[in-house]
C-alpha cells in the first residue's frame, strides 16, 4: 500500500476537474484500511468513493483515502427473498446488473446511476420511483477515530430524500465498507409508475416487463437525458428538488400556474429544480467550459477545462436567478469541496 503525494484527482471525480490530493492512498481490503487509519491518526483525512457526487473547487490538503474494497455475494436466501452484500468499492451499476442477471428484483429502477455502492446510503440515492432505502437492510462502517466496525440498521440510517445519518449526526465519522440489500426472488414488485418508464416500455411494445426490461428502459431514458461522465464531465443532479411549504407554494403557484409540483405530505410539495432552472433561462447555456446540460437543466457539465470554482460560480448564479424569479432556494445536492 503506497501513499502517493501531489496526486492528480482528475480521473477520480466524474466532473473531470483537475485538482490535487496532498497525499493519496487506495485501499483494497479492510486490514489495509485499518492500518492506514491507525498510522495516520493525526493527519487530516478525506474519504473518496466513486467521486460521482462532488465538485472539487481546490486541492485537497489531506490524506485522500480511496475506498476500493471489492466483492459481492449472496448472504442468505429463502424461497422469496435474497440478501446480497456488496463491498463499498464495487461500481453501483455493475452491482445492479449482477443482481438483475440473477433475476433478483428491487434495484432495476436505479440502473446506470454513477458511483460506488459504498456511497449509496450516504445520500439515499434514488431514481424513477425507487430509493435505496426501499431495499436497504444494513451497512457496515468503520469508525475513523478507533477503527471499530459498526453495523447501521435501516432505522439507524434515518433515510430521507437524498439524506441520511451519514450527512448529519455522524458526518465524517465513519467509512462505509459494505452494504446489504434484501431483494425479491419471485413476485417482483415491478414499478413503472414513473411516467418516463411506462412510456419507454410502451414504445417497445412491452406490456409485461421483466426486471431486465425495466432496467433497459431506465438505461435508455438516462442515456437520452443525462450525459455520460466518460464523455462530458458531470455529477448527475447538481441540485436537490426543493421542498416548499404548501402555504408558500400556493402564492407562488398563483403567479406561475404552469409550475410543476408533486405532493409529498399534507403540508409540503416538491418542485422540480430542473423546471425552475429551465424557466430561469439556463438550460443548455455555456459559460467558458462550464455549462448547463441541454437535455436536463439539473445537471451542470464540464466541457473540458472548467475549474471547480467556475462551475461553483455558475451554480451560484443559477441559485440567485431562480430565487429572484420564484422566491425558491435551490440547494446543491453535490458535495462542494
Ligand atoms: N424538467 C424540466 N426541465 C429540465 C429538467 C426537468 O422542465 O431541464 C421537469 C420535467 O419535465 C419533469 C420534472 O422536471 O416534469 C422532473 O424531471 P425528471 O423526471 O427528469 O427528474 P428530476 O426531478 O429532474 C430526479 C432526480 C434524478 C433522477 C430523476 C428520475 C433529484 C435531485 N434528481 O430528477 O437523480 O434520475 O429524478 O427519477 O432528485 C441524480 O440524483 O444525480 C439524478 C440524476
Image (cartoon, rainbow, N blue to C red):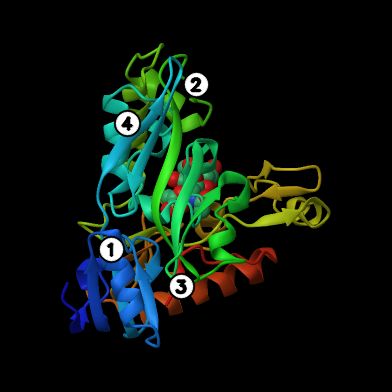
Q: Mark 1 or mark 2: name the one nearer the start of the chain.
A: 1
- Give the spatial CA distance, label 3 vs label 2: 41 Å
Q: Dot 4 corresponds to which residue?
A: 99
Residue 318, x across and y down, in percent: 51, 70
- Give the spatial CA distance, label 3 vs label 4: 34 Å
- Check the picture and name the quadrant holding the C terminus: bottom left
For label 4, the SS is helix
- Horizontal relation, residue 226 to residue 172: left or right: left
Q: Dot 1 corresponds to which residue?
A: 31
Residue 299, x across and y down, in percent: 41, 58
- Give the spatial CA distance, label 1 vs label 3: 14 Å
- Horizontal relation, residue 172 to residue 164: left or right: left
Vertical comparison of 198 with 92: above or below: above
Residue drawn at the location 45% of the way across and 62% of the way down: 238
Q: Mark 1 or mark 3: name the one nearer the start of the chain.
A: 1
CA neighbours of label 4 inside 10 A, class few (<14), some (14 to 19), many (20+): many
Q: Nearer the viewer, mark 1 or mark 2?
A: 1
User: Is the C-beta separation of discs 1 and 2 under 8 Å?
Assistant: no
Question: Is the residue indicated by label 3 positioned so its CB lies within 8 Å of ligand 1?
Answer: no
Q: Dot 3 corresponds to which residue?
A: 146
Residue 213, x across and y down, in percent: 33, 22
- Check the picture and name the quadrant holding the N terminus: bottom left
- Horizontal relation, residue 24 to residue 78: left or right: left
Residue 65, x across and y down, in percent: 30, 72
Residue 9 showing in the rendered view:
no
Q: Mark 4 or mark 1: name the one nearer the start of the chain.
A: 1
Which residue appears farthest toward the top when viewing the image? Answer: 208
Q: Dot 2 corresponds to which residue?
A: 189
Vertical comparison of 170 with 177: above or below: below
User: Is the C-beta separation of discs 1 and 3 under 8 Å?
Assistant: no
Q: Nearer the viewer, mark 4 or mark 1?
A: 1
Amino acid at each position: 500500500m503506497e501513499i502517493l503525494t501531489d496526486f492528480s484527482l482528475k480521473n477520480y471525480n466524474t466532473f473531470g476537474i483537475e485538482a490535487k490530493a496532498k497525499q493519496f492512498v487506495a485501499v483494497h481490503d479492510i486490514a489495509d484500511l485499518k492500518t492506514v487509519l491507525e498510522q495516520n491518526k493525526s493527519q487530516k483525512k478525506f474519504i473518496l468513493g466513486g467521486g460521482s457526487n462532488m465538485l472539487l473547487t481546490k486541492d485537497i490538503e489531506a490524506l485522500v483515502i480511496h475506498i476500493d474494497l471489492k466483492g459481492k455475494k449472496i448472504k442468505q436466501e429463502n424461497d422469496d427473498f435474497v440478501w446480497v452484500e456488496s463491498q463499498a468499492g464495487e461500481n453501483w451499476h455493475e452491482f445492479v446488473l449482477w443482481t438483475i442477471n440473477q433475476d433478483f428484483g428491487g434495484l432495476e429502477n436505479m440502473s446506470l446511476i454513477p458511483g460506488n455502492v459504498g456511497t449509496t446510503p450516504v445520500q439515499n440515492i434514488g431514481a424513477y420511483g425507487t430509493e435505496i432505502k426501499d431495499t436497504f437492510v444494513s451497512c457496515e462502517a468503520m469508525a475513523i477515530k478507533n477503527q471499530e466496525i459498526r453495523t447501521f440498521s435501516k432505522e439507524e440510517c434515518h433515510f430521507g430524500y437524498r439524506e441520511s445519518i451519514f450527512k448529519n449526526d455522524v458526518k465524517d465519522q465513519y467509512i462505509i465498507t459494505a452494504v446489504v440489500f434484501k431483494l425479491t426472488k419471485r413476485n417482483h414488485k415491478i414499478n413503472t409508475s414513473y411516467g418516463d418508464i411506462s412510456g419507454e416500455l410502451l414504445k417497445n411494445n412491452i406490456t409485461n416487463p421483466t426486471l431486465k426490461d425495466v432496467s433497459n428502459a431506465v438505461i435508455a431514458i438516462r442515456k437520452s437525458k443525462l450525459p455520460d461522465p466518460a464523455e462530458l464531465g458531470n455529477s448527475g443532479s447538481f441540485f436537490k428538488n426543493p421542498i416548499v411549504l404548501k402555504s408558500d407554494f400556493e402564492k407562488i403557484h398563483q403567479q406561475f400556474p404552469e409550475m410543476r409540483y408533486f405532493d409529498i405530505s399534507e403540508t409540503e410539495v416538491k418542485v422540480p429544480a430542473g423546471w425552475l432552472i429551465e424557466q430561469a433561462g439556463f438550460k443548455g447555456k455555456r459559460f467558458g467550459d462550464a455549462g448547463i446540460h441541454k437535455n436536463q437543466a439539473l445537471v451542470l457539465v464540464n466541457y473540458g477545462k472548467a475549474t471547480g470554482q467556475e462551475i461553483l460560480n455558475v451554480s451560484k448564479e443559477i441559485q440567485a436567478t431562480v430565487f429572484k424569479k420564484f422566491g425558491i432556494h435551490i440547494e446543491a445536492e453535490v458535495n462542494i469541496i
